[in-house]
Image: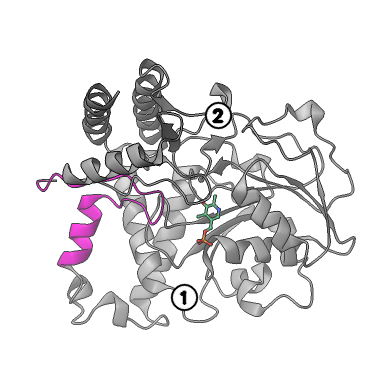
Amino acid sequence: MSNNNRNFGAGPGKIPDEVLKEAQLEFLSYQNIGFSVTELSHRSEAYAKINQEAQDDLRELLNVPSNYKILFLHGGGQGLFSAVAMNLIGENGTANYAVAGIWSKIAANEAKKYGRIDLVFPEPDSGTIPAINDWTINPKASYLYYCDNETIQGIEFPFVPDSKEVPLVADMSSNLLTRKFDVSKFGVIIAAVQKNLGTAGLGIVIIKDTLLDKALNICPSILNFKLINEYESILNTPPIFSIYMFGKVLKWIKNQGGLDKMEQLSIQKSQLLYNTLKQSNGFYHNNIPEQNRSRINVPFRINKGDVDMENKFLKEAEERKLFQLKGHKLVGGIRVSMNNAVTCEDVQVLVEFMKEFQQENQ
Ligand SMILES: *Cc1c(COP(=O)(O)O)cnc(C)c1O
């Protein structure tokens, strides 16, 4: 857009300018109905259409098979951590977790409230994901859980784990709709939308229909997958604005050329950035093994973790309107998030700045 502001935040992350403009244009009167979408009844025909179209577009983009349901829930990512456990851990009360980073660890700890959780490999400290043959999967586990893209450390799975007969559950909050994959390999896919797909408030569940009816009695109705499905995701007042924005982002992705295009761009953008790190000869340093590096979130340290230098980098970046580059507080340093709405030009401008900064400060 004309203002040259560039947002590299992980989440809430960048929403396409076109989507924000469209929402702005119709904010006071949604499609000329005379009032705002934030004032719209969830029992109205207009909302039923927003709800249905968002589901249909997601189904189309991801090629979701007809025996999978799409559900919209409150509670964001962490709400879904609890929902997964309460809906799936089932009668035998045990599940397997592949903990390769901070988000899967938080999910595993949350699930421990509802049953026995076994890790399929010892927690790695270097960002290395063990090969699937080295995982200990209990064939009787109710499900096997992993996080496809660890947003904080920048670790992404280069493969879909083969869980055999055990239903596979994946958190794709920060990389859903950035690459193609086969939905039928999964039992459940969860995602909070505010990283890459819209504005906070909405959690998405894509679930194989045979897994719908296994919730523990203690599961609250608003997190109960079977009930939410029966009510077509309008059991109580949904986060309407968030679903409306999500729907617009999906249409934007379709207009851009769908998943093929998003995948191609994400490879291009991440290669540009990782090459810049490599060419800096250690001035910029990312410690994740190459095969497990995220295409979406790229954390790095400057000058071996020189905090003053990193703060200087952040300040000068902001002066150039390069925003939200501060690393997550648990890992520090810098983090560049290249969500779908971040353009190749945005990354180009950033790497030019990085090169100049290195020259001036090395
Ligand atoms: C941000 C994030 C979450 C948590 O999302 P909230 O909506 O803040 O609870 C979970 N998983 C991943 C991969 C995330 O990036």
The residue that label 2 is drawn on is 288
Q: In this view, does 200 lie to the left or right of 102?
A: left
Q: Does the magenta stretch include residue 9?
A: yes
Residue 238: give its label.
Answer: 1
The amino acid at mark 2 is Ile
- Does ligand 1 reach within 8 Å of label 1's beta carbon? no
Q: What residue appears at the point 35 percent right and 65 percent down from the top-left corner? A: 244
Residue 343 lies, in percent from the top left, at 26, 37
Q: Is residue 78 magenta?
A: no
* CA distance separating discs 2 and 1: 38 Å
Residue 238 lies, in percent from the top left, at 46, 75
The part of the image, by quadrant, that contains residue 243 is: bottom left
Q: What residue appears at the point 30 percent right and 82 percent down from the top-left corner? A: 39
- Does ligand 1 reach within 8 Å of label 2's beta carbon? no
- Colour style of the rendered protein structure: one colour
**Badge 2, how many Cα within 10 Å: few under 14, some, many 20+?**
some
Residue 74 lies, in percent from the top left, at 52, 71
Q: What residue appears at the point 55 percent right and 60 percent down from the top-left corner? A: 77
Residue in front for this viewpoint, 31 or 236: 236
Residue 232 lies, in percent from the top left, at 54, 71
Q: What residue appears at the point 75 percent right and 29 percent down from the top-left corner? A: 132
Mark 1 element type: loop
- Work out whether residue 342 can be spotted: no
Tell which tag, 2 or 1, sits nearer the viewer: 2
Magenta segment: 2-25
Tell which circle, 2 or 1, labels the residue nearer the N-terminal end.
1
Say which quadrant the C terminus sits in. top left
The amino acid at mark 1 is Pro
